[in-house]
Image (cartoon, rainbow, N blue to C red):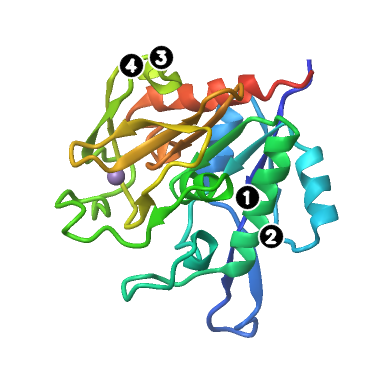
């Protein structure tokens, strides 16, 4: 049987220095590719593009969509003006991913959102996020200074959720975010929180597999091998019919 094809959304950057300075590039972190390979899928990088017809083709050619991590999201997309602590935004990437999510949801493709991808998923379906977690929201360190394999904070999972079926109701995770989900979108349930109440995962109420996690499981495969279970469940759900 053919392996499921998993589209991984690309990030963008401008090359600094050298003769190619200023050249726009698109990329994904190798850890996502490795996680999808380990889970039995075929990773395919989906570059940021603007044309909706071509975005629909991108969604059609994959069996599942992995929304990768990255920078901050343009606040106008959830009806706000930027706060002082907002980082750099990439509006082309935001538009691309929101369109991809809507297209993939309509086509009933499984989706896994990671970190920024969890927030993108929520905004695409009509939810909102905190532009910046201030001390009023939390005193926990959600932007850890330690390496990605290190699980810095405790996450409590909702009993009966997909994630709890993988790991039970408590899991240790890394944390590399200063934004977080505020209002969950219609159709998405909050299935994980840290002890300060910050949302760490959402799951779709009816779709076979639409899950967003606020941490980076792909960076923990060596330190906590059970994190691979999330990717194998996702790839299994994306199995070609
Ligand atoms: Mn966190």
Q: Earlier in the sequence, mark 4 or mark 3?
A: 4
Q: Nearer the viewer, residue 159 or 225?
A: 159
Q: Earlier in the sequence, mark 2 or mark 4?
A: 2
Camera-near label (4 vs 3) is 4
Q: Which residue is mark 2?
A: 48
The residue carrying pointer 3 sits among few (fewer than 14), some (14 to 19) or many (20 or more) residues within 10 Å by Cα, namely: few
The residue carrying pointer 2 sits among few (fewer than 14), some (14 to 19) or many (20 or more) residues within 10 Å by Cα, namely: many
The CA span between labels 4 and 1 is 30 Å
Which residue corresponds to the image point at 60% horizontal and 31% vertical from the top-left? 37
Camera-near label (1 vs 3) is 3
In the rendered structure, find residue 165 and report the number of the disc placed on it: 3
Query: Compared to 13, does 169 lie above or below?
Result: above
Q: Earlier in the sequence, mark 2 or mark 1?
A: 1
Relative image position of residue 100 (x, y in whole percent):
69, 48
Q: Which residue is mark 1?
A: 9
Q: Which residue is mark 4?
A: 159
The CA span between labels 4 and 3 is 8 Å
What secondary structure is found at the residue carrying circle 1?
A: strand
The residue carrying pointer 4 sits among few (fewer than 14), some (14 to 19) or many (20 or more) residues within 10 Å by Cα, namely: some
Q: Are marks 2 and 1 in contact (CB under 8 Å)?
A: yes
Is 139 situated left or right of 174 in this image?
left
Which residue corresponds to the image point at 45% horizontal and 20% vertical from the top-left? 162
Q: Earlier in the sequence, mark 1 or mark 3?
A: 1
The CA span between labels 3 and 2 is 34 Å
Which residue corresponds to the image point at 41% horizontal and 73% vertical from the top-left? 82
């Amino acid at each position: 049987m053919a392996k499921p094809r998993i589209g991984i959304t690309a990030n963008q950057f401008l090359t600094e220095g050298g003769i190619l300075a200023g050249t726009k590039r698109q990329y994904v972190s190798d850890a996502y590719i490795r996680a999808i390979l380990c889970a039995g899928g075929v990773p395919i990088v989906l570059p940021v593009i603007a044309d909706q017809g071509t975005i629909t083709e991108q969604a059609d050619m994959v069996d599942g969509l992995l929304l990768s991590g990255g920078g901050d999201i343009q606040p106008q997309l959830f009806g706000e003006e930027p706060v002082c602590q907002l980082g750099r935004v990439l509006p082309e990437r935001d538009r691309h991913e929101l369109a991809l999510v809507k297209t993939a949801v309509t086509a009933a493709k499984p989706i896994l959102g990671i970190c920024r991808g969890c927030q993108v998923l929520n905004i695409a379906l009509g939810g909102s996020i905190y532009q910046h977690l201030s001390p009023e929201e939390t005193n926990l360190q959600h932007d850890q200074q330690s390496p990605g394999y290190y699980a810095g904070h405790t996450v409590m999972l909702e009993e009966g959720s997909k994630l709890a079926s993988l790991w039970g109701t408590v899991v240790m995770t890394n944390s590399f975010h200063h934004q977080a989900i505020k209002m969950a979108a219609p159709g998405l349930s909050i299935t994980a929180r840290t002890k300060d109440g910050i949302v760490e995962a959402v799951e779709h109420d009816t779709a076979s597999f639409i899950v967003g996690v606020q941490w980076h499981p792909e960076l923990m495969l060596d330190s906590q091998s059970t994190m691979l279970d999330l990717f194998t469940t996702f790839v299994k759900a994306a199995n070609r019919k």
